[in-house]
Amino acid sequence: MPGIMERNQQKVELAQLGYSLKYIDDWPPKTTLYRHKPSYNVEGMIVEDIGTTAPNVPGNPDYVLSKARIGMFPWPPSATCTCKWCVGQNGEKKTKDVVPEDNSSVIIIEV
Ligand SMILES: [Zn+2]
């Protein structure tokens, strides 16, 4: 059992990441997480794009907090999401929007 201090820290961190207090106090045993950040393989190719779901995962604060740190949340990514990945994306252009129509000038995007 984590101590009270640890539990409170977890709550604060979850709230800062955009979790509602309702979720924190009343978390479901199972939830579905949505990727707000693509995952890449070692070659830099997207393996799982933004919006990919991970259904039926544990809903406990320890688990969702560890996933929130890598860009997975129980709500879909959107323009109103305040997570750092959605906010970053709405401020910048998405990689897939920058690819030119003709292949003569391929833009390399450093990640
Ligand atoms: Zn987000």
Image (spheres, rainbow, N blue to C red):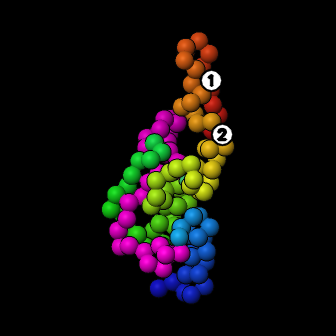
> Could you tell me residue 23's position as x and y percent?
47, 73
> Could you tell me residue 68's position as x and y percent?
52, 61
Q: Which mark is residue 92?
A: 2
Disc 1: which residue = 107
- Front residue (pair 82, 71): 82
Beta carbon of the mark 2 residue lies under 8 A of ligand 1: no
| Left or right: 54, with 6 as reference point | left
* Image quarter (top left, top right, bottom left or bottom right) of the C terminus: top right
Residue 107 in view of the camera: yes
> Could you tell me residue 36's position as x and y percent?
51, 50
What span is colored magenta in the figure? 21-48
In the image, what residue occupies the spot 58% across and 70% down? 15
Determine if the magenta segment contains residue 40. yes
Residue 41 in view of the camera: no
- Residue 42 position (above or below residue 76): above
Alpha-carbon span between mark 1 and mark 2: 15 Å
> Could you tell me residue 81's position as x and y percent?
56, 55
Q: Earlier in the sequence, mark 1 or mark 2?
A: 2
In the image, what residue occupies the spot 57% across and 34% down? 95
The quadrant where residue 11 appears: bottom right
Q: Which mark is residue 27?
A: none
| Left or right: 83, with 25 as reference point | right
Circle 1 or circle 2, nearest the eye: 2
Please tell me whether mark 2 sits on a helix, a strand or a loop: loop
The type of residue carrying mark 2 is Glu
- Residue 62 position (above or below residue 81): below
In the image, what residue occupies the spot 59% across and 56% down? 83
Label 1 CA crowd tier, 10 Å (few <14, some 14–19, many 20+)? few
- Front residue (pair 110, 55): 55
